Image: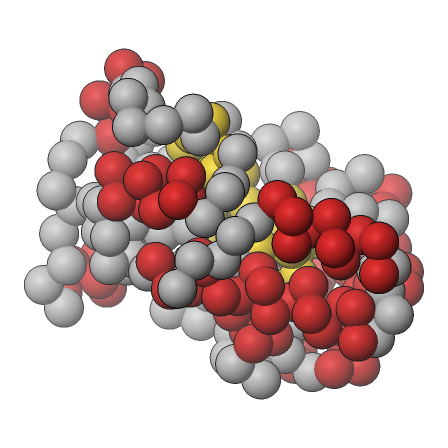
Amino acid sequence: MHTASFSDGLNTIEELVLFAGKIGMKEICITDHSDAPVLWHFQEKGIFPSAARWSLPSYKNVQNDVQVTFGVEADILDADGNCCFTIQGKDSDFCILSAHKDVYKDDPETVTDATIKAIERYADKIDLIGHPTCNNQFGRYYDLPRLVEVANYWNIPLELNGKSVARGKSDEQQVIYLLEHANKIYFNSDAHNLSDLQEYRKTVVEMLKDWEYISQKDYEKFHSYFSFVS
C-alpha cells in the first residue's frame, strides 16, 4: 500500500494502521515508491513527502495490534536491468520490484528481458515481482511464461494486483496463467486509499472463488478473518 507521507497515497501511516485494525487485518506492509524519477514526478504535481524516512525505524504502532512493516516498491530503470531499491536514501525490509511507465524509458518490448536481468542480478533483494499482469503499466508487454519460469527458478513470488483486477486493467488470460503456473503468488490491494484497502482484496477473493481457484472453505475462512466494515 502507498501513503501520503512518501508517495502517491491519500492517507497517513497512522490512518492506514487504524483502518487495517478496524477491518480485521493482522499485518500490513507499506511499500511506497522508490527514489526513482517517479517520486520527482509526484513532486512536480505538488505531492511532497511529509516526514523523513530515517524516522521509521523508531516507529511503534500504539493504535492496535497490527504488525507494520515498511518496504519499498523499487523500480526497474532500463533495459540493462538496473534498479532503484532505495526510498529517501534508505533500504527497506521488504522489496516489490516493478516496472513503471513513468520511470522505465526504454522500449516497452524490452521489459521482460530487463526484469529477468534484474532478477538474476538482485534476487537476494527482491521479495515480490509487482503487477506483471497490469495492462496500464507493462502487463501487455511481458512475456509472462518466461517471467514466471525465471521467478519460479529463483523462488520469487509474483503479484496478483487487486486494484488492476478490480478495475479491469488485467487481462483475464494472463491472470489465469499466473494462477496456474506461478509457484508463489501474493495478492495485494495496491491500496492508495482506505477504500482500496477494504474493497480490492475482497474483490479478488470473490473472483478466485468464482473461478474455483479457492475452495468454499477457504472463502469462508477469509471472510471470518475480515469484517469489511462499511
Residue in the picture at 69% in, 83% down: 171
Q: Nearer the viewer, residue 30 or 194?
A: 194
Q: In x, y percent, where is residue 172?
A: 74, 82
Judge from the rendering whether residue 141 lies leftward or rightward of residue 227; answer left or right.
Answer: right
Estimate the x, y position of residue 60 in percent, counting from the top left. Answer: 30, 19
Task: Mark yes or no: residue 107 visible.
Answer: no
- Left or right of 188: which side holds 67? left
Question: Where in the figure is residue 1, as x and y percent of width and height?
Answer: 42, 50
The extreme top residue here reads 58
From the viewer's perspective, is 98 left or right of 215?
A: left
For residue 105, above or below residue 227 = below
- Residue drawn at the location 79% of the way across and 68% of the way down: 209
Residue at left offset 14%, top offset 59% = 47
- Residue sitting at 9 percent across and 63 percent down? 46
Instruction: Tally the marks.
Output: 0
Q: Determine the image quadrant of residue 17.
A: top left
Going by the image, does 117 lie left or right of 12?
right
Give the quadrant of the C terminus: bottom left
